[in-house]
Image (cartoon, rainbow, N blue to C red):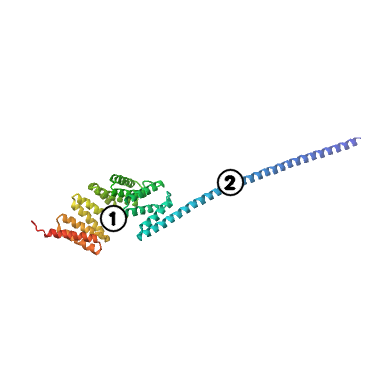
Amino acid sequence: MRKLFRTINRVLGLRKSIQNSCQYTINKTKFLDLKISNSFEDAGKKQLFFCKFMYFTFIGLGTKNNEKKKKKEDEQDILGNKWKREKDVSQHIALAEVALKHGEPKKAEVILQDVVQLCGTEPIVGVCCAYDMLATIAYKEGNILKAKDILEKVINYLISSGTDPNHDRVVQFRLKLARILSKLGFSQDAEDNFKECLEIQKLKSQSEMLNEESEILWINTLFWYGKHLSNNKKYVEAKECFDTAYKISARTKSLLSSQVMVILFNLSEMSYLGGQKDEALRYLLNAVTLGQLTNNSDLPTYYNRIGLIYLSKGLLNEAKIWCENGKNKGKRGHNKNAQAEGESCIKKINELIRIPKA
């Protein structure tokens, strides 16, 4: 009986052990299945997220790249079109220059007007040159009012296209406009433009904006304003302008000696008109020294002028020497005006020599 009970207990114990073992296995399997399932589900989610991320990322990058590419192409098109227009402008200007050389100003004018119409208000290199040539053609043909209108147009064109009103290029055209206004007799308008140009260039001289080109423009403005004043018989103010221009020229390397000679000639004229004959002679002699260094073709004119000043001082021998030099050098240089001036001066001297002294 006891043996039977022991046998039953063993069987029951074995069954329980097997049941527990199976339960553990089942639980473990479920756990593993759950873990694996979660892993695959997570992996799937991650894969889907990655695919979506990469899809939208590539879409975004593609859009940006396309935009950049399109922008770059547009910029290249703009630059290409601008380059083409600039090339067309330069070719038109070259054709206009050929027409002018062949004595066909009307043909040149038509070509240059095409340039202006081609560019409109767009800032293209060479358009200012076309305007300048048009103004020059009009001026040479005696149509000064037309030249004035053209200069006003180019000034407006430059400013409307974004050029600083104080830029040298604008001042250059304003200076030309002032000269034409002076020629037309619009004295006050000319005065206002001259003074404003002078003020702009003077301010540049007091800042870092001044360069060699700006300084030469300042000298030109002083010179032409001096001419305007002398034409209006304001000799003292004119002399101040010429004197300032001469002083600035001393530190300007790129100014030609022939240009300095012209300034000195006008200084001499103002001194002479002011009764300062010795000072007038001094300016002319300085000019002659410069001219002899470069064998300037205008020297005969300066010789004659020195002779006339000596003549006005009553120094006939000195006057005759200078005027004979002027006449002879004028003849050798085929300068008919200088030759005629020299002959006229010598004639006056000979007449005075023949007059018996009282």
Which residue does the image show at 88% across and 36% down from the upper left?
8
Left or right placement of residue 354 versus residue 143 in this view? left
State the image quarter where residue 53 is shown. Answer: top right
Crowd band around label 1 with a 10 angstrom C-alpha radius: few (<14), some (14–19), many (20+):
some
Q: CA distance from mark 1 to mark 2?
A: 66 Å
Number of numbered discs present? 2
State the image quarter where residue 358 is shown. Answer: bottom left
Residue situated furthest bottom in the rendering: 332
**What residue is disc 2 on?**
60
Vertical relation: 104 (above or below) 163: below
Vertical relation: 14 (above or below) 145: above
Give the percent coordinates (x, y) of residue 94: 39, 58
The secondary element bearing badge 1 is classed as helix
- Front residue (pair 325, 295): 325
Kind of residue at badge 1: Gln
**What residue is disc 1 on?**
259
- Front residue (pair 331, 286): 331
